[in-house]
Amino acid sequence: MLHASVKAVGWIVGGPDTILQALLDVLTPSGTLMMYVGWPDGTQEMECWPEDRRQAYLDECPPFDPATSRAVLEWSILTEYLRTWRGAYRSAHPEASVAAVGALAEWITADHPLQYGYGAGSPLAKLVDAGGKVLLLGSPFDAVTLLHYAENVARVPAKRVVRYRAPLLEGGRRVWKEIEEFDTSNGIVDWEGEDYFALITRQFINGNGMGVSSPRVGQAECHLLDAASLHRFGVAWMERNLGTSR
């Protein structure tokens, strides 16, 4: 699973395509490359919008279509490059959407649960089950999406839950669906100080011995993290620091 900043890498011949092709070459056809791509028209915060904007979305927002809906470029310009790569697959969850290319891409993206889309059965859970890794290519430590899976699993009391509606494409028609998940925007509980995803990732890299730091790629600092080990570390950290385990 890739988290990348093309800006951090710096100028490179061929630009973003070269970065993705280099990664796929290293993985070989037996490997798989995936990214969290989301959806820029996500409606998770819609109930907080002004009434006129909310009504406009209810009336006019095109439905989420895994085949054509754009990726969120805020996460990295590479999200849209990977989504449109030849042979790419994309999962059908509007907000937690993942794109993948390679041997396990179809399996990784298939049957993405609509409810609690970062939990059991999600592409994140499959990444752990498959013995995958997380590559930070110039990406900040607070961007490790895999830790949302740890939020789902961690036994933390009174985890914050959000409910929202999203327009999905079903049988050629737009259908508004109710979605429920743990709060991925504000955290599963109140937490003061540095973003706890950044804290977990830094502590994992510095103290757990399971993160591999590599020479820079261009100007970008890189870290390769074992997904299953990071997941277990994240679950334990959350249970210890975000509340009494049940």
Image (tube, rainbow, N blue to C red):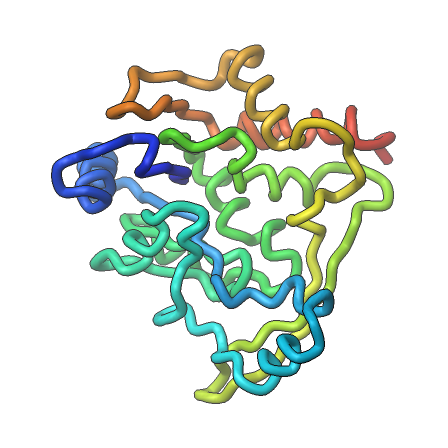
| Depicted 168 relative to depicted 78: above or below | below
Percent coordinates x, y for residue 135 in the rendering: 39, 31
Q: Residue at x 37, y 37 (%)?
A: 4
Q: Residue at x 84, y 32 (%)?
A: 243
| Depicted 205 relative to depicted 141: above or below | above
- In the figure, is residue 241 to the left or right of 11? right
Percent coordinates x, y for residue 159 in the rendering: 80, 46
Q: Quadrant of residue 18?
A: top left
Residue found farthest to the left: 13
Q: Residue at x 62, y 50 (%)?
A: 119
Percent coordinates x, y for residue 201 in the rendering: 56, 25
Q: How many marks?
A: 0
Percent coordinates x, y for residue 168 in the rendering: 53, 77
Q: Quadrant of residue 44?
A: bottom right
- In the figure, is residue 199 to the left or right of 34? right
Q: Residue at x 72, y 65 (%)?
A: 48
Q: Quadrant of the N terminus?
A: top left
| Depicted 169 relative to depicted 82: above or below | below
Q: Quadrant of the C terminus?
A: top right
